[in-house]
Amino acid sequence: MTNWSWSDDPNRDKEAEKYDNPVPSRDFILKLLEERGKPLTHRQICAEFQLHDDEAIEAVRRRLRAMERDGQLLYNRRGAYGVAEKMDLIKGVIIGHRDGFGFLKPDDGSDDLYLSARQMRCGFDGDKVLARQSGTDHRGRREATIVEVLERKTQRLVGRYFKESNIGFVAPENRRISQDILIPADDALKAKNGQFVLVEITQFPSFRGQPEGRIVEIIGDHMAPGMEIDVAIRNYDIPHVWPQAVEAAAERFGSGLVDSDYENRFDLRKTPFVTIDGEDAKDFDDAVFCEKKRSGGWKLYVAIADVSHYVHPGDPLDQEARNRGNSVYFPEHVVPMLPVNLSNGLCSLNPHVDRLAMVCEMSISAAGNVSRYCFYEAVICSHARLTYNKVGTMLQEPDSLEGQDLRQEYSQIVPHLENLYALYHAFRAQREERGAIDFETTETKIEFGEDRKIEKIVPTQRNDAHKIIEECMLAANVCAAKFLQKYKLPALYRIHEGPKNEKLENLRAFLKELSIPFMARTDPKPSDYQEVLGSIKARPDFDLIQTVMLRSMNQAVYSPENKGHFGLAYGAYAHFTSPIRRYPDLLVHRAIRYFVRSGKESTNAKKTPGAPVIPQQHILPYDTAAMVELGEQCSMTERRADEATWDVIGWLKCEYMSDKIGDVFKGIITGVTGFGLFVELKDIYVEGLVHVSSLNSDYYHFDEVRHRLVGERSGLIFSLGDEVTVSVAKVDLDDRKLDFEMLAGGKRQRWSKDNPKPEATARKGKKADSSEKKSAGKAAKGKASKAGSPKAGSPKGNAQKAGSSRGGTSRHEVAKLAAKKSRNQAKSKGAAKSGAKAKSGAKAGMRSPSKPKPKARKKR
């Protein structure tokens, strides 16, 4: 048997370059386990490599956990690690489906496996499991059998409480969990029928029994004002209650600066910094000042709130900020990352009060290029709290009555604003030269009346003041990224990789159909995208083409490994400018502040004479592995915030439309799938689904390349971007869904040799007509139509089989089970059947038989 030694690792030198405390590489660990032919514990692996140092042992533990996370190793119940491929087991995460079945997403990135409704009875959406491939279904999909649940993701969940036949249960708000939670009478907390509650799971689901739980909080009545936010906060597990230790730590700082705060900082209080934000902003991360240089060009100062002075690694404030990851902005409600007395007080660059800041001072040429930059600690005093509307009026409408009045009111600041405006034009020219992608998307704002009732949904207008601040922040963020890279500091970059080949080919095919040249090959550049956008601005289908291009892009994430930012066309980019509301920015501040105080010679950083060094372990105690983990955490909390916000907006938009059933609207097709068309109503900015089964009497073929549905007999075509007329058929608040009925629209197609008629669809039984809708089997994988949600209601949504009902145990069985206390008799009656026919577009999202039919909602 081979004697193993860490010194024999062929990757040892590479490990030593990457880590301060190098350990055996992944390849070497895999080689050891393969030769031993059996799983080994963490201690056994360290002994094999003759590692006895505590730091090395801990580093190996973290590496093993990372290999387990990435699917290279499996961790068994005896606490030993084995090579996944050798154990014939697949580790992955359950992805639940509203119809009762689900999928296993393997950790190794291979294709998903199908989980039947029966298999889904032993776990919830998000659970980590070990599974074994058990064959394929009739559609050729790999099927899996769950062997063991490794980690339960859902410990608590939000749902509505119901009581029938004296048996209580909770219908989960998360539609990916298709099992109701039994609630014993003693654990119901006096909840009333239909109320939203928070449930703690006391018995997890299994093949032998239904899940059980106890109510730990009554959130409130179904239609109470603001309930949608309370539900989303708990449903997405967003931390929102301040622990006592966090509140105590925040209160310790008081309301203003103390004498010691001014030490070791440059005094810039006389520099006329200003903040420029929205009308309703309450926390101010950034302030700017710009002056002309005698030699030409400008000097730009971007001052960012120095949160790192108050929030230290590992303290209660830091732990809570890390858990939250970012502030969450709901309509007219914010869940802040930091306590309010910091986020809106001491850390906020409020006007006419002294505040601590980290300053990025930049010299910028007349062509808009940053020639020099320098970071340092400072004390500033904002000279004015300005808004985008005021600055936009002063700069873009200087001769208007309002513009003249504002320029008079801020006469001492106007020259500096004009410097910023001139700099902005230089930045924009440089942006175009760089080839950055400039998508023109429409954002909306919900305006409320009394009792939080929506009065209207309006598009938000971006003026040049928005763009001035945007360009200034981009410049500071790029300087921060270059600083991190130059001095090899551990922090998180904001990375945006280029589009994947499959999406790129789909985009190329789509543009080719429209005779739009797209020069990008396998390695596209941002300028390739921008060139297309520039060439189509005058086209009537600009929005359609831009949407397809946007959907070909990857999502930006946080990572300690710099991979550049494709969309912005930067070789390095980081988030530096919002540490009050984003944890990655705070990490970047700590890295920069550590270097500033280190005393190392640099033209990019300076400190006041005599400023003491801050030891790295006190301000930047992170290695690469810790930063990888932080990057994943921050990316997750960002997605969580986005999804929760979309969910709330979807609820609000559905409520807004609930009294408009039967009303007729003009709309634009914004998404085309195999199961229907997504339509956004004009001037209302609400999106819903026209299900394929509700279209005219015909069979429709989904043309994925051209983004259209084509009628087999009629030749009627519905394409992305077409204007149509629809009526509101159904509003489902529980599922955040709107169903529309097509009244007019589409184009007639003339068949030709170059454009042949689709082959006839094989049919069973009667010919489809208006009374018998077509099979949902044509839909392939679909998406839930959630009103106003980019993740559902657009091609970003989740796989859904149109026309199926949710699976799970019926509520009558639930009552029977609870009464007899024999959970092993549970049967799944509502499992989704492959190829089931859709009865109507609305039924694509109907609730499980295990859920009571929602009662009529009262208007708020």
Image: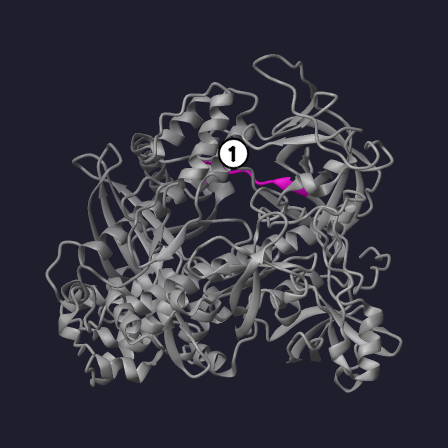
Where's the C terminus, which quadrant?
A: bottom right
Depth check, front residue: 504 or 753: 753
Depth check, front residue: 64 or 408: 64
Q: Secondary structure at mark 1?
A: helix
Q: Residue furthest right?
A: 165
Question: Left or right of 108: which side holds 700?
Answer: right
Does the stretch in magenta take in 461?
yes
Residue at x-position 57% and y-position 68%: 146
Residue at x-position 61% and y-position 49%: 799
Residue linked to disc 1: 548
Give how far across and how far down residue 728 sits, in percent: 79, 39
Residue at x-position 43% and y-position 84%: 78
Residue 171 occupies which quadrant of the picture? Answer: bottom right
Question: Left or right of 433: which side holds 633?
Answer: right
Where's the N terminus, which quadrant?
A: bottom left
Examine the rendered structure and indicate whether residue 43 appears above or below residue 229: below
Residue at x-position 72% and y-position 32%: 762
Give how far across and how far down residue 317 sits, in percent: 42, 75
How many marks do you count on the picture? 1
Magenta region: which residues? 457-465
Q: Residue furthest left?
A: 601
Question: Left or right of 58: which side holds 726?
Answer: right
Say if residue 454 shows up in the picture. no
Residue 694 occupies which quadrant of the picture? Answer: top right
